[in-house]
């Protein structure tokens, strides 16, 4: 059974930092691209990043470029997102998710984590 | 403003059929990229409902179906049930953004 378990969310002041982790199990982690998606209060889903199976970054939203970095440790089956210079508008539930598809442009999410809440507020 | 446009809300009575549209452009749906659909209940993670335009993952009832034509796609739900109340999102790839995009989401209300 595929499981994705996020951790690291919480309350942080504007300008602060957080590191989210996503522990994966139930599938061959090092052969799948992974992604972070967020949903801010009262808003829809927003794609944050896509990281390829070897750790190369394939996409990051303009809204987080230069502030968030993404990595993975395939030896630990874990995905990471380092969030710096946090802003109020980064307040959201952050989901870790597994991608699948025949080719990059057809990738979609077949499994989602339960999400972790990040609140940026003073 | 989402790259893929969905109606903010749709509604229907139990047993009825509803459709949710997802309108894109020549750089995403119109370019031939596949469309996928997700459902999200409050306080829970989204779940894949339709992938590659028309395919249902195992466990998704055949009341749910997807279609795609030109620059648009749609999700149809037949035999509407109270438990279908949720937010629905379409997703595709956009060559102008070099990335993956969601629609703005549609809230389905069962009357």
Image: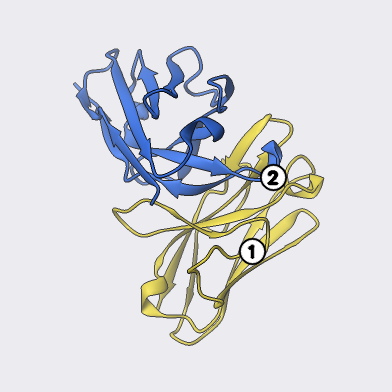
- Could you say which is closer to the camera, residue B33 or residue A28? A28
Label 1 SS: loop
Chain rendered blue: A
Residue at image position (27%, 17%) is A14
Give the quarter of the image for residue B37: bottom right
Which residue has dot 1 on it? B55
Which residue has dot 2 on it? A102
Q: Which corner quadrant holds the N terminus of chain B?
A: top right
The colour applied to the residues of chain B in this rendering is yellow
Q: Position of residue B12 (x, y in %)?
A: 48, 79
Asked whether, in this view, residue A19 is left or right of residue A100, the answer is left
Q: Position of residue B6 (x, y in %)?
A: 58, 56
Q: Are marks 1 and 2 in contact (CB under 8 Å)?
A: no
Q: Residues within 10 Å of mark 2 (few under 14, many from 20)?
A: few
In the rendered image, the residue lying farthest to the bottom is B15
Asked whether, in this view, residue A14 is left or right of residue B94, the answer is left
Q: Position of residue A3 (x, y in %)?
A: 36, 45
The chain under label 1 reads: B
């Amino acid at each position: 059974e595929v499981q994705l378990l996020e951790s690291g969310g919480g309350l942080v002041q504007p300008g602060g930092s957080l590191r989210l982790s996503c522990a994966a199990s139930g599938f061959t982690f090092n052969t799948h691209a992974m992604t972070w998606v967020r949903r801010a209060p009262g808003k829809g889903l927003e794609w944050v990043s896509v990281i390829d199976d070897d750790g190369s970054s394939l996409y990051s939203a303009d809204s987080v470029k230069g502030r968030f970095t993404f990595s993975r440790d395939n030896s630990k089956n874990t995905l990471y997102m380092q969030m710096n210079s946090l802003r109020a508008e980064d307040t959201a539930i952050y989901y870790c998710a597994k991608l699948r598809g025949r080719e990059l442009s057809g990738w979609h999410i077949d499994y989602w984590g339960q999400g972790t809440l990040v609140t940026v507020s003073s | 403003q989402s790259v893929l446009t969905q109606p903010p809300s749709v509604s229907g009575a139990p047993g009825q059929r509803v459709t949710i549209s997802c309108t894109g452009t020549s750089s995403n749906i119109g370019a031939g990229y596949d469309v996928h659909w997700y459902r999200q209940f409050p306080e829970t993670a989204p779940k894949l409902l339709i992938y590659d335009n028309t395919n249902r993952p195992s466990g998704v009832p055949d009341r749910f179906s997807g279609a795609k034509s030109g620059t648009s796609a749609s999700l149809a739900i037949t035999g509407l049930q109270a438990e279908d109340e949720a937010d629905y999102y379409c997703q595709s790839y956009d060559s102008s953004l070099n990335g993956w995009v969601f629609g703005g989401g549609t809230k389905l209300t069962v009357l």
